[in-house]
């Protein structure tokens, strides 16, 4: 049974964001029992300190292990041999899809953390939260936030989701508000500095 857990974990985390686009039959009694047990346990978790993919993975694994015996019942219900890994992947897909379709918030939040960490590693993007201070105009526009480590400046080079909220002086209404900025480090030529420098280009901003 232990060999099935890592496999199922990968399946569940991978399907968190694709589930809504897929078609799946209604869960049977054994599967619904597992879904209810797992979702209730996940919804009770304190996720405030979970920041990394590893933390989210370990937390999900520890939670699911308490209900792993129910997976055998689900496999039996579906006529699947638990030793058949390709077939068990299908079982895992069904569970992952159903958890999202049934809006299991604990599972969705954990999956977002796992997927978010993966996306950052793949694209090189990073996120940081701070208090909005101002927009600096130095050849290009820069959005400046205050963080515990000091002020940080982010290059507003291209349109990004929500960029219109900061145009034509409208940014002043966000003074003192918390922002989460997603950025990616790039190298650009800065006319005022007359050279190439690495800067953090804004990819998106969430106003908290």
Image: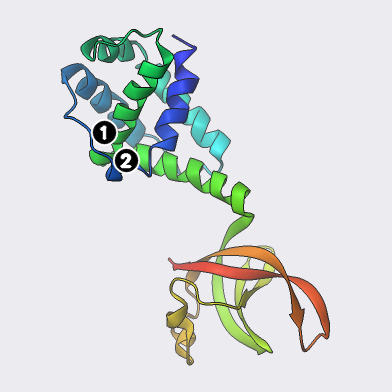
Q: Can residue 73 be seen in this view?
A: yes
Q: Nearer the viewer, residue 102 or 191?
A: 191
Give the answer, above or below, for where 68 lies relative to 103. above
What count of labels does the image hold?
2
Q: What element carries label 2?
A: helix
- Residue plotted at (30% across, 11% down): 80
- Is 173 situated left or right of 78 in this image? right
Q: Which residue matches tag 2?
A: 19
CA gap, disc 1 to disc 2?
A: 8 Å
* Rendering coords of residue 138 (x, y %): 69, 88
Q: Residues within 10 Å of mark 2 (few under 14, many from 20)?
A: many
* Rendering coords of residue 65 (x, y %): 42, 17
Q: Quadrant of residue 191?
A: bottom right
Q: Which residue matches tag 1?
A: 98
Q: In which quarter of the image is residue 97?
A: top left
* Rendering coords of residue 71 (x, y %): 32, 15
Disc on res. 16: none
Q: Quadrant of residue 89?
A: top left
Asked if labels 2 and 1 touch by Cβ distance under 8 angstroms, the answer is yes
- Residue plotted at (67% across, 72% down): 151
Q: In which quarter of the image is the C terminus?
A: bottom left
* Rendering coords of residue 96 (x, y %): 33, 32
Name of the residue lying farthest toward the front: 86
Q: Which of marks 1 and 2 is in front?
A: 2
Q: In which quarter of the image is the N terminus?
A: top left
């Amino acid at each position: 049974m232990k060999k099935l857990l890592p496999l199922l974990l990968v399946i569940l985390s991978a399907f968190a964001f694709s589930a809504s686009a897929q078609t799946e039959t209604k869960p049977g009694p054994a599967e619904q029992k597992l879904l209810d047990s797992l979702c209730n346990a996940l919804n009770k978790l304190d996720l405030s300190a979970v920041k990394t993919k590893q933390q989210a993975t370990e937390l999900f694994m520890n939670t699911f292990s308490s209900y792993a015996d129910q997976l055998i019942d689900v496999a039996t219900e579906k006529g699947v041999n638990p030793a058949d890994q390709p077939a068990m992947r299908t079982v895992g897909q069904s569970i992952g899809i159903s958890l999202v379709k049934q809006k299991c918030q604990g599972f969705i939040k954990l999956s977002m953390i796992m997927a978010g960490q993966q996306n950052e590693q793949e694209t090189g993007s990073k996120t940081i939260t701070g208090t909005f201070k101002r927009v600096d105009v130095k050849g290009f526009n820069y959005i400046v936030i205050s963080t515990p480590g000091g002020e940080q400046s982010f290059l507003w080079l291209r349109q990004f989701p929500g960029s219109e909220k900061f145009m034509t002086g409208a940014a002043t209404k966000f003074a003192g508000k918390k922002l989460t900025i997603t950025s990616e480090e790039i190298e650009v030529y800065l006319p005022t500095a007359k050279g190439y420098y690495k800067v953090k280009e804004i990819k998106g901003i969430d106003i908290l």
